Image (cartoon, rainbow, N blue to C red):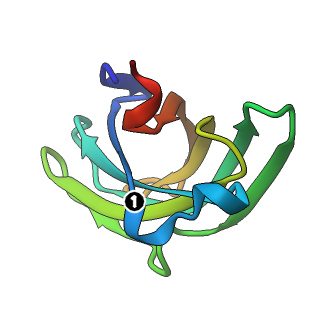
Protein backbone atom coordinates (compact mmCIF):
# COMPACT_ATOMS: atom_id res chain seq x y z
CA UNK A 1 0.00 0.00 0.00
CA UNK A 2 1.17 3.49 -0.75
CA UNK A 3 1.64 5.69 2.32
CA UNK A 4 -1.07 8.21 3.15
CA UNK A 5 -0.47 11.57 4.85
CA UNK A 6 -3.36 13.15 6.72
CA UNK A 7 -2.98 16.14 9.08
CA UNK A 8 0.79 15.71 9.08
CA UNK A 9 0.65 12.04 10.09
CA UNK A 10 1.91 9.45 7.60
CA UNK A 11 0.41 5.96 7.68
CA UNK A 12 1.99 2.90 6.04
CA UNK A 13 0.41 -0.57 6.14
CA UNK A 14 1.76 -4.02 5.31
CA UNK A 15 -0.44 -7.14 5.37
CA UNK A 16 0.54 -10.81 5.67
CA UNK A 17 -1.48 -14.02 5.44
CA UNK A 18 -1.08 -16.26 8.52
CA UNK A 19 -1.44 -19.87 7.27
CA UNK A 20 -0.57 -21.38 10.68
CA UNK A 21 -3.60 -19.63 12.23
CA UNK A 22 -5.97 -20.23 9.30
CA UNK A 23 -8.23 -23.13 8.40
CA UNK A 24 -9.43 -22.70 4.79
CA UNK A 25 -11.56 -25.88 5.01
CA UNK A 26 -13.65 -24.10 7.68
CA UNK A 27 -13.57 -20.69 5.94
CA UNK A 28 -11.18 -19.25 8.54
CA UNK A 29 -8.47 -16.95 7.18
CA UNK A 30 -6.19 -15.04 9.54
CA UNK A 31 -4.07 -12.08 8.52
CA UNK A 32 -1.57 -9.87 10.31
CA UNK A 33 -1.01 -6.22 9.53
CA UNK A 34 1.82 -3.92 10.47
CA UNK A 35 1.10 -0.20 10.69
CA UNK A 36 3.74 2.50 10.83
CA UNK A 37 2.59 5.91 12.07
CA UNK A 38 5.02 8.78 11.45
CA UNK A 39 4.54 12.21 12.99
CA UNK A 40 5.63 14.81 10.41
CA UNK A 41 4.31 17.70 12.51
CA UNK A 42 6.33 20.11 14.67
CA UNK A 43 4.37 19.06 17.77
CA UNK A 44 4.05 15.88 19.81
CA UNK A 45 0.90 13.80 19.35
CA UNK A 46 -0.93 11.07 21.25
CA UNK A 47 -3.05 8.43 19.52
CA UNK A 48 -6.25 8.25 21.59
CA UNK A 49 -8.49 5.82 19.70
CA UNK A 50 -9.06 3.83 16.54
CA UNK A 51 -12.04 3.09 14.32
CA UNK A 52 -12.06 0.33 11.67
CA UNK A 53 -14.44 -0.65 8.90
CA UNK A 54 -13.79 -4.28 7.94
CA UNK A 55 -15.21 -5.83 4.76
CA UNK A 56 -15.12 -9.51 3.87
CA UNK A 57 -15.49 -10.46 0.20
CA UNK A 58 -18.63 -12.46 1.05
CA UNK A 59 -20.43 -9.17 1.69
CA UNK A 60 -20.20 -9.07 5.48
CA UNK A 61 -19.18 -5.85 7.17
CA UNK A 62 -18.19 -5.00 10.72
CA UNK A 63 -16.95 -2.01 12.67
CA UNK A 64 -14.40 -2.01 15.48
CA UNK A 65 -13.53 0.92 17.71
CA UNK A 66 -11.66 1.38 20.92
CA UNK A 67 -8.98 3.17 22.88
CA UNK A 68 -5.47 3.31 21.46
CA UNK A 69 -3.92 0.49 19.48
CA UNK A 70 -2.86 -2.93 20.80
CA UNK A 71 -3.56 -1.79 24.35
CA UNK A 72 -1.58 1.47 24.34
CA UNK A 73 -2.10 5.13 23.52
CA UNK A 74 1.30 5.92 22.02
CA UNK A 75 2.90 9.35 22.25
CA UNK A 76 4.82 10.20 19.07
CA UNK A 77 7.36 13.03 19.07
CA UNK A 78 7.93 15.20 15.97
CA UNK A 79 9.82 13.24 13.32
CA UNK A 80 9.38 9.93 15.16
CA UNK A 81 7.56 6.75 14.19
CA UNK A 82 5.42 4.28 16.09
CA UNK A 83 4.89 0.79 14.70
CA UNK A 84 2.60 -2.02 15.79
CA UNK A 85 1.34 -5.37 14.57
CA UNK A 86 -2.21 -6.63 14.92
CA UNK A 87 -4.47 -9.12 13.19
CA UNK A 88 -7.84 -9.63 11.57
CA UNK A 89 -9.81 -12.74 10.68
CA UNK A 90 -12.01 -13.25 7.62
CA UNK A 91 -14.37 -15.91 6.29
CA UNK A 92 -12.98 -15.62 2.74
CA UNK A 93 -9.57 -15.35 1.04
CA UNK A 94 -10.04 -11.62 0.42
CA UNK A 95 -10.85 -8.71 2.70
CA UNK A 96 -10.18 -5.05 3.26
CA UNK A 97 -10.03 -2.52 6.08
CA UNK A 98 -10.06 1.24 6.36
CA UNK A 99 -10.50 3.59 9.24
CA UNK A 100 -9.19 6.48 11.26
CA UNK A 101 -7.32 7.42 14.39
CA UNK A 102 -8.28 10.15 16.83
CA UNK A 103 -5.10 12.08 17.62
CA UNK A 104 -4.39 14.74 20.25
CA UNK A 105 -1.89 17.57 19.70
CA UNK A 106 -0.18 17.57 23.10
CA UNK A 107 0.97 21.19 22.70
CA UNK A 108 -2.56 22.64 22.65
CA UNK A 109 -4.86 19.65 23.41
CA UNK A 110 -6.51 20.03 19.97
CA UNK A 111 -8.09 16.78 18.70
CA UNK A 112 -7.98 15.78 15.03
CA UNK A 113 -8.58 12.69 12.91
CA UNK A 114 -6.07 10.88 10.73
CA UNK A 115 -7.39 8.77 7.87
CA UNK A 116 -6.12 5.24 7.43
CA UNK A 117 -6.59 4.40 3.76
CA UNK A 118 -8.07 1.11 2.62
CA UNK A 119 -5.70 -1.82 2.79
CA UNK A 120 -6.26 -5.24 1.25
CA UNK A 121 -5.87 -8.76 2.63
CA UNK A 122 -5.38 -11.57 0.12
CA UNK A 123 -4.18 -15.14 0.47
CA UNK A 124 -1.14 -15.95 -1.69
CA UNK A 125 -2.83 -18.96 -3.25
CA UNK A 126 -5.55 -16.72 -4.75
CA UNK A 127 -2.99 -14.65 -6.67
CA UNK A 128 -2.77 -17.23 -9.50
Residue 111 drawn above or below residue 42: below
Residue 3 placement (x, y as % from top left): 30, 24
- Rendered residue at 26%/43% (across/down): 39
- Rendered residue at 54%/31% (across/down): 115
Residue 5 placement (x, y as % from top left): 36, 24
102 and 55: which is toward the camera: 55
Answer whether residue 106 is visible to the viewer in this image.
Answer: no
57 and 115: which is toward the camera: 57
Residue 56 placement (x, y as % from top left): 73, 38
Residue 122 placement (x, y as % from top left): 48, 34
Number of marks present in the image shown: 1
- Rendered residue at 34%/24% (across/down): 1
SS type, badge 1: loop
Residue 126 drawn above or below residue 88: above
Instruction: Spot the residue most to the bottom.
Output: 71
- Rendered residue at 27%/47% (across/down): 36
List the residue tagged with mark 1: 18
Q: Is residue 66 left or right of residue 81?
A: right
Instruction: Spot the residue most to the front.
Output: 25
Badge 1 crowding class, 10 Å Cα cut-off, few under 14, some 14 to 19, many 20 or more, is some
79 and 23: which is toward the camera: 23
Answer whether residue 6 is visible to the viewer in this image.
Answer: yes
111 and 58: which is toward the camera: 58
Instruction: Classify the position of the C terminus by image quarter.
Output: top left
Amino acid sequence: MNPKISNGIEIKVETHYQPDFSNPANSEFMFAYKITIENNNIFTVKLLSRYWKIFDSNGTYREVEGEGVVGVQPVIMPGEKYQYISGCNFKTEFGKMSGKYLIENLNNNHLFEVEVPTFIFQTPFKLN
